[in-house]
Image (cartoon, rainbow, N blue to C red):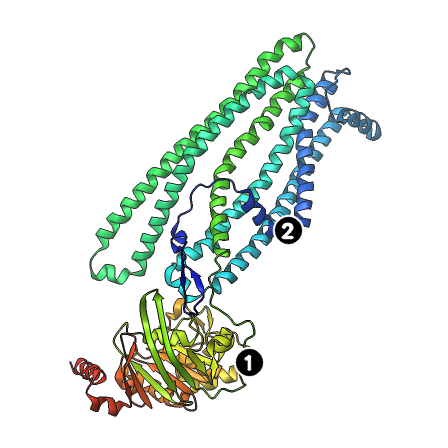
């Protein structure tokens, strides 16, 4: 990375935003990342401890089940072998004692023991999974909240360069991958506890046969390694093509009217079919390998059983092994081989989760932020609203100035209109006024106070902004006007709505102010959404009002309503109005003409028309457009 000098004359790191474009792929095991991830589980270590104890108990009971069948039922009860030295963990003695106490046949007692152990293993295993999942979900909920909170406070400069979809992937898909990882770790614990206990029992019964079976483990491990390496590539390709399909589907559905108008249905279907065919190819190859791998595992287990039967046949005849011990060996084979298989299944999840974890912590560690004063100035309860720009300069890209040495004073209560060609810097100016980008010290003042000495939260409470694209949140009309501010009650909302002429159409809705708005407010017209935007800013009662192309996409009738509302809401407030339609700003106190980042003209509407400059040209062109 290299450094440059930012607007505040402080060294700034030139960041590599391309890292947010990277797709999820395989990654090496990162213990540092794993330890950091486990930090979010630390508040729930009690649940994890309980889960660990429960899985040990459930695993122990799982081990006892085959011992009851082989050593208790077959050797002790059916064959009456009293000289069995295999580790039965006292189950034979327990069977004898319970039979004496309850006066029931040993076989009935053995069946009861098996049922109790089976139910206990299932119940405790279920409790283990519940507590583990609860701890994992709670930890990842906290991680998701921390990630959301962190990304919500990143500056506008970050989202200028990083697609919102990439950020959403980290908050949703990547966190979900971590859930699969942590849940899988709990599954591995439940598999390896029986593995070691079974290995211990088998070694106590017959060392040679156990070592012979252990020779199969390296083969299973090698096959699993190559299988998972191949499937990891196919998994990634399948995910990428699935992502392409979803993106293609979203684009077509979102632009369905354009598709139908341009008669692109067949073209789009052919493209979607091509991507779908590619995805199907990856999925089919993946399914074939999965099927082959499953058949290999089953075959190895059956070969192991055959090996046990062949090797132990002569030993049973020589009475060096009992029939129950042979049966126990065949039942323990699954416990011996299964952990390797499960470990292989968890490998892809592990690698994907490591990549997801890196992407999440990459976002959490992204420290780009706008400068905030350590000791912010407390503004007065009500501002006069004077704004001073002094030699203001700004560039999004070093060396490419968008605002060039601007000096200007907006007087308290004045309405300043800003016009100019597209890209001249109008919107940038008001973004700097709201401190959405860092600016140099002593370049913008509010009532004589340097903006850099005011905390951005306090500043934005005093500046009400209405944008051309009014954003609708999920919820009621009241929620969208009050924005959850407890100081704005229904009375204030209704009062603000009446002033901007929004109350009339709101009252015609089925539930009035309690009407739930659909996604992006599609059950409202563009003009109605704009009226809600005016009601929202008016209800907050800011001292300064900024309108950025707020009337660009509305009909003439609604514009007349807004013109009347503008006269009311700008009264007593310092207002800055950016508009493409010149008739909306003719009543402004002054008009500022922006061009290529500099002030081209400044004066009243009549003065600029008489000057016959850029403003007069813009006015004439628009007048011709409207007449045409």
First in residue order: circle 1 vs circle 2:
2
Q: Secondary structure at mark 1?
A: loop
Which residue is pictured at 60% across the width and 51% down the height?
39
Nearer to the camera, 548 or 413: 413
Indicate left or right for 579 with 198 as reference. left
Question: Is 43 drawn above or below residue 159 in the view shown?
Answer: above
Q: Residue 201 at what x, y percent from top left?
A: 68, 23
Q: Nearer the viewer, residue 93 or 366?
A: 366
Q: Nearer the viewer, mark 1 or mark 2?
A: 1
Q: Position of residue 259 (x, y in %)?
A: 24, 59
Instruction: In this rendered view, identify the residue nearer to me: 333 or 48.
Output: 48
**What secondary structure is marked by label 2?**
helix
Residue carrying label 1: 378
Mark 2 is surrounded, within 10 Å at the Cα level, by few (under 14), some (14 to 19) or many (20 or more) other residues, namely: few
> Percent position (x, y) of residue 76?
74, 19
Q: Is residue 255 visible?
A: yes
Going 38% across and 87% down the picture, which residue do you hit? 565
Q: Is residue 253 left or right of residue 337?
A: left
Looking at the picture, does residue 619 appear above or below residue 324? below
Which residue bears the numbered disc 2?
42
Q: Residue at coordinates 48% horizontally, 53% vertically from top-left?
A: 362
Asked whether, in this view, residue 4 is left or right of residue 217, the answer is left
Res. 500 visible in picture:
no
Query: Would you identify the image quadrant in which residue 68 lies?
Result: top right
Residue 85's quadrant in the figure? top right
- Residue 258, how many percent across, how many down? 24, 62
């Amino acid at each position: 990375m290299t450094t440059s000098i930012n607007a505040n004359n402080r060294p700034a790191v030139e960041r590599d935003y391309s890292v947010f474009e990277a797709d999820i792929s395989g990654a090496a095991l990162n213990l540092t990342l794993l330890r950091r991830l486990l930090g979010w589980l630390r508040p729930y270590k009690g649940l994890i401890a309980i889960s660990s104890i429960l899985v040990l108990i459930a695993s122990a009971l799982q081990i006892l089940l085959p011992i009851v069948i082989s050593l208790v039922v077959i050797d002790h009860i059916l064959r009456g072998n009293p000289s069995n030295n295999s580790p039965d963990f006292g189950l034979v003695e327990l069977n004898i004692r319970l039979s004496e106490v309850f006066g029931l046949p040993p076989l009935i007692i053995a069946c009861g023991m098996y049922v109790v152990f089976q139910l206990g293993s299932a119940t405790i295993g279920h409790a283990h999974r519940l507590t583990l999942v609860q701890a994992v979900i709670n930890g990842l909920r906290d991680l998701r909240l921390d990630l959301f909170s962190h990304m919500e406070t990143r500056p506008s400069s970050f989202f200028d360069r990083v697609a919102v979809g990439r950020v959403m992937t980290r908050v949703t898909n990547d966190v979900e991958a971590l859930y699969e990882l942590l849940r899988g770790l709990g599954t591995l614990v439940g598999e390896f506890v029986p593995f070691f206990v079974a290995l211990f029992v088998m070694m106590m019964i017959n060392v040679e046969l156990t070592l012979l079976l252990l020779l199969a483990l390296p083969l299973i491990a090698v096959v699993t390694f190559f299988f998972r390496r191949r499937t990891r590539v196919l998994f990634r390709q399948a995910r990428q093509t699935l992502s392409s399909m979803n993106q293609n589907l979203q684009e077509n559905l979102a632009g369905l009217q354009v598709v139908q108008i341009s008669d692109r249905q067949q073209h789009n279907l052919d493209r979607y079919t091509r991507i779908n065919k590619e995805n199907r190819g990856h999925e089919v190859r993946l399914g074939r390998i999965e099927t082959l791998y499953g058949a290999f595992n089953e075959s190895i287990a059956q070969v192991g059983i055959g090996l046990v039967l062949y090797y132990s046949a002569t030993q049973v005849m020589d009475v060096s092994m009992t029939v129950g011990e042979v049966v126990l060996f065949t039942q323990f084979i699954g416990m011996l081989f299964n952990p390797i298989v499960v470990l292989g299944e968890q490998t892809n999840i592990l690698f994907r989760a490591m990549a997801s974890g890196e992407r999440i912590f990459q976002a959490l560690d992204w420290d780009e932020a706008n400068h905030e004063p350590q000791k912010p100035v407390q503004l007065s309860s009500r501002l006069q609203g004077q704004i001073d720009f002094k030699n203001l300069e700004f560039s999004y890209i070093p060396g490419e100035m968008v605002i060039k040495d601007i000096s200007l004073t907006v007087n308290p209560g004045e309405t300043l209109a800003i016009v100019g060609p597209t890209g001249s810097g109008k919107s940038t100016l008001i973004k700097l006024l709201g401190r959405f980008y860092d600016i140099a010290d002593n370049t913008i003042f509010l009532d004589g106070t340097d903006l850099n000495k005011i905390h951005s939260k306090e500043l934005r409470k005093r500046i009400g902004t209405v944008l051309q694209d009014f954003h609708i949140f999920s919820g009621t009309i009241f929620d969208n006007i009050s924005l959850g501010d407890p100081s704005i009650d229904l009375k204030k909302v209704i009062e603000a709505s009446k002033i901007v002429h929004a109350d009339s159409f709101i009252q015609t809705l089925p539930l009035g102010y309690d009407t739930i708005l659909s996604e992006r407010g599609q059950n409202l017209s563009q003009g109605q959404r704009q009226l809600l935007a005016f009601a929202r800013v008016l209800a907050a009662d800011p001292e300064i009002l900024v309108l950025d192309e707020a009337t660009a996409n509305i009909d003439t009738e609604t514009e007349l309503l807004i013109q009347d509302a503008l006269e009311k809401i700008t009264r007593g407030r310092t207002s800055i109005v950016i508009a493409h339609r010149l008739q909306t700003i003719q009543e402004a106190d002054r008009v500022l003409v922006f061009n290529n980042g500099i002030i081209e003209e400044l004066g009243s509407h009549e003065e600029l028309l008489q000057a016959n400059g850029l403003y007069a040209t813009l006015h004439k062109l628009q007048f011709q457009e409207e007449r045409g």
